[in-house]
Amino acid sequence: MDIGQYSGWSDVLSGVPGVPQGSVLGPLLFVIFINDIDDGIAGKILKFADDKKIFYKVGSANDKVMHIGYNNCCAEYDMDRNKLETATEEKDLGVMVSNNSKCDKQCSEAVIKANKILGMIKRNFVVNSKEIIIPLYKSLVRSHLEYCCQVWSPHYNKDIKLLEGVQRRATRLVSGMESFCYADRLKNLGLTRLKNEELEVI
């Protein structure tokens, strides 16, 4: 193809639409990559979407790395005579797991990611109509706020308000919505609160 020329449009019949990491070739390339990843691994592997985890059965008290619970004995963990540091939080399949079982870190990280994308939308789209902003928000922003929320669903008001604040800002981007209160903006835009009274999503 010569410089300055463009290929024609073609219908996409497969892929991962509607998610932040979505792509057309992603699923195929992932299957090729992941197909033989078990070979040569001593432990067992759990596979989930585009992530994987190596694990094995805990055989003694020394196998602990993260200590969870007030009555935990906090046993030391070592490998080849090298003491491993104790972690207070760790990311597992994209979710921050903390030793105190709180989700504030997960909430703050989700809000940071969502706000960055919301800022990108605000900077790059001149026309802020409902037909443009809401599909962008639902596919690129809200998906971060709801990712695996069945696991880390917050129950503290400060975390709920933090997440809801992203959607408040998103609804203000739509032209003509500036003068409405948040509840009316949601109704006019066909959105629900992140903490849905019926579904209790978050």
Image (cartoon, helix red, strand yellow):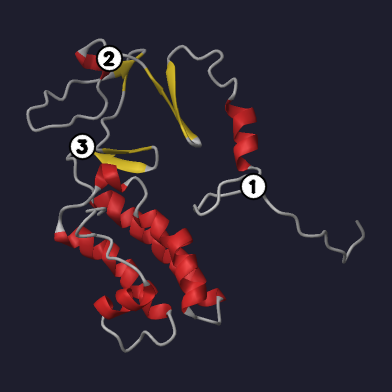
Picture coordinates of residue 9, whole percent (x, y): 76, 59
Sooner in the amino-acid sequence: mark 1 or mark 3 = 1
Q: Quadrant of residue 33?
A: top right
Q: Residues within 10 Å of mark 3 (few under 14, many from 20)?
A: some
Q: Residues within 10 Å of mark 1 (few under 14, many from 20)?
A: few
Q: Residue furthest right?
A: 2
Q: Which-is-in-front pick, marks 2 and 1?
A: 1
Please name the residue that numbered disc 3 is placed on: 99
> Residue at coordinates 29% horizontally, 85% vertically from top-left?
180
Residue 51 position, x and y percent, is 47, 34
**In which image quadrant can residue 189 be found?**
bottom left
Q: Is residue 90 left or right of residue 52?
A: left
Query: Mark 2: few, some, or many residues within 10 Å (few <14, many ≥20)?
Result: few
Query: For residue 149, which numbered disc appears in the image?
Result: none
Instruction: Give the labeled residue for mark 1.
Output: 24
Q: Quadrant of residue 142?
A: bottom left
Q: Going by the image, does 126 lie left or right of 189?
A: right
Image spot of residue 61 (x, y percent): 20, 15
Instruction: Give the CA separation, mark 1 to mark 3.
Output: 38 Å
- How many callouts does the rendering have? 3
Q: In screen coordinates, is 24 left or right of 76?
A: right
Mark 1: amino acid: Val
Name the residue carrying label 2. Answer: 58
Name the kind of residue labelled 2 in the image: Val
Q: Image quadrant for the C terminus?
A: bottom left
User: Relative to residue 46, is residue 88 depicted above or below?
Assistant: below
Alpha carbon of mark 2 to alpha carbon of mark 3: how far? 18 Å
Residue found at x 22% / y 11%: 60
Compare residues 60 and 26 and report the one nearer the observer: 26
